[in-house]
Image (cartoon, rainbow, N blue to C red):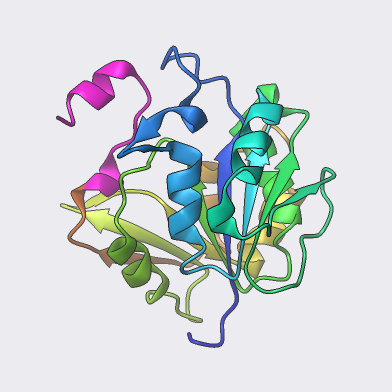
Amino acid sequence: MSESKIGGLLVSAGLSSRMGNFKPLMEYNGETYVIGITRKLIQVCSKVVIVTGFQKEKVESTINSQSAFGGQVLNLPTGRQGSQLGKVVSCVNNPDYEKGMFTSLQTGAKCLKDCDWVLYHFVDQPFHKEKFYEELILQADDNYNWIQPVYNNKEGHPIMFNKRVIELILYGSQNATLRLIGDLPAIKKKYWNCSYPNILKDYDTPDDISKSF
């Protein structure tokens, strides 16, 4: 596991229509969702790709303004391979973001084809602790190609998948979904029974946030 290259894929491209505010730039514990998640991902990933779409300029400006990332941020043309230089944060734009989240997943996956594993993250889960990510990546296992956390017998997110799943994602149509990919015979899932109930929630509406407090 220690020799595996793990890439982080953070989707920040959607309209956030049900929330009423643009989720990537909302704040949790004093920092925007997109910054807080990225900051934690770079602790366990060799590189992180942030897929932008709606209000991409604002997301890219927010990421590039973060001195915590040490000037490592790259703005990549759509589909271009990410940098190979150590821990780096990259922004890649998905012009087809309104066609669905799977198009953003495909856009980000193109930049992470050299990774052994990808940690796939939604931007509306800013609440996971550093320890959660540390424990999640330890679940990587060459006998499987899909790692998913489970709490109280319910499957949650984020998940990890390996190169084989990346191939299936890239060959899929824009109308596909990750759920359909996960149901393919080629997918071998490992379920991690964890102690983190937050894997079952996300902040999709204002009511979701109010229920958390």
Q: Position of residue 65 (x, y in %)?
A: 62, 42
Residue 46 position (above or below residue 205): below
Q: Is residue 166 left or right of residue 39?
A: right
The residue located at (51%, 81%) in the rendering is 142
Q: Is residue 178 left or right of residue 115?
A: left
Q: Is residue 199 left or right of residue 37?
A: left
Asked whether residue 210 is drawn in magenta, I would say yes
Q: Position of residue 164 (x, y in %)?
A: 65, 67
Which span is picked out in magenta?
Answer: 198-213
The residue located at (38%, 25%) in the rendering is 204
Instruction: Answer with the quarter of the image where residue 192 lies.
Output: bottom left
The residue located at (15%, 52%) in the rendering is 152
Asked whether residue 128 is drawn in magenta, I would say no
Closer to the camera, 120 or 49? 49
Asked whether residue 184 is in view, the answer is: no
Residue 36 position (above or below residue 204): below
* Count of numbered badges drawn on the protein: 0
Instruction: Answer with the quarter of the image where residue 189 lies.
Output: bottom left
The residue located at (67%, 37%) in the rendering is 60
Quarter of the image where the C terminus is located: top left
Residue 38 position (above or below residue 83): above
Instruction: Answer with the quarter of the image where residue 129 lies.
Output: bottom left
